Image (cartoon, rainbow, N blue to C red):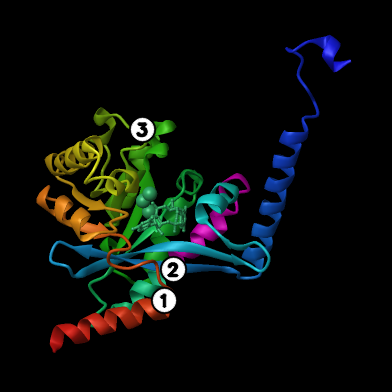
Amino acid sequence: QAKAAGRNTVRFFDPEMQAIATANAALASDLRQAWLDNQLQIEYQPQVGADGHMTGVEALLRWEHPERGTVSPAQFIPTAEETSLIIPIGHWVLESACAQLAAWAHRPERAHLGISVNVSVRQFRHPDFVDEVTSAIVKSGIEPRKLRLELTESLLADGIEVTIAKMGSLKAMGVTLSLDDFGIGYSSLSYLKRLPLDQLKIDRSFVRDILTDPNDAAIARTIIGLAHSLGLGVMAEGVETEAQRDFLARQGCEEYQGFLFSRPLPIRELEALIDRLAAEEVT
Ligand code: C2E
Ligand code: MG
Ligand code: MG
Ligand code: MG
């Protein structure tokens, strides 16, 4: 029957598609359960300035599933977006980051640190987003600039004016705004200059082969130059070697994040690292 109908016929039952849909549904239902059971955690990855001192950390979600094992955010964030679970989860990450900043505010060796929080498109688009950020800041009493929201170029896909207005409200509050994974998306330069940003983050994919691929080196150099000519700071992500860091430093990059400095760490390990670094400083 299907054969006779020819190749242009829509197949209502495609076993392969069906398998994918089932797997997605299972992941979605596990994620919902994980959220309800408090199985999600936040790790923090250090960010380092030009002088080698820690400037802040990025909050990164972690999911350790009893049977699936470690599920990467690259895998479950899209599911969280599709199911809208990203709204409560993202809100929790935001409030946790602010609570952490508040706890650090009266500890001399920690008070200068900022925390970067990834904001998904779905979250940013939500009508309550700006209010949620405001209330997280007010409740925790933190200095707004220490909260660094990481947005991605995909925000620009819908309504540039709305995006600019929303970013403007966040900016007016004093929050720091970074554009994450810069260079892999589709933002045009004319948009970029209109966005009230503080910082560009060079995507990891350009940093990886920066020493061997002249194109990646040129792109990284261009992003650093672009950031500076727009009056923005620039941070490189995925820095794994001294040689990569040195190359970026020579191009004028001023902040770094990557395994060279530290992997993302559970909060206790991060705090132990901060204390250890502070102690080394004194001695
Ligand atoms: P991202 O925001 O670009 O985060 C940086 C990613 O690079 C993290 O992956 C981090 O572990 C990884 N990374 C850092 N340094 C290195 C390095 O030197 N080498 C290598 N190979 N990787 C490095 P992770 O934790 O797997 O997160 C993946 C993505 O998931 C994040 O990319 C972000 O887009 C998303 N994500 C994570 N947490 C959240 C969250 O709380 N909310 C939202 N909306 N998205 C999140
Ligand atoms: Mg990020
Ligand atoms: Mg990034
Ligand atoms: Mg990235």
Distance (Cα) linking label 1 and label 2: 6 Å
Say if 153 sits above or below 69 in the image.
above
First along the sequence among labels 3 and 1: 3
Label 3 SS: helix
The image position of residue 98, as x and y in percent, is: 39, 68
Q: Nearer the viewer, mark 3 or mark 1?
A: 1
Q: Is residue 228 left or right of residue 138?
A: left
> Which comes before the other along the chain, label 3 or label 2?
2
**Ligand 1 lies under 8 Å from the Cβ of mark 2:** yes
User: In the figure, 188 relative to 242: above or below?
Assistant: above
Give the residue at x 42% y 38%. 154
Label 1 beta carbon less than 8 Å to ligand 1: no
What residue would you read off at disc 2? 43
Find out whether the residues at labels 1 and 2 contact each other: C-beta distance under 8 Å.
yes
What's drawn in magenta, residue-wise? 81-96
Q: Pointer 3: residues within 10 angstroms few (<14), some, or many (20+)?
A: few
Quarter of image, res 10: top right
Which SS class for mark 1?
Answer: helix
Mark pair 3, 1: CA separation? 38 Å
Of the pair 229 and 257, the residue shown nearer to us: 257
Residue on which the image places disc 1: 267
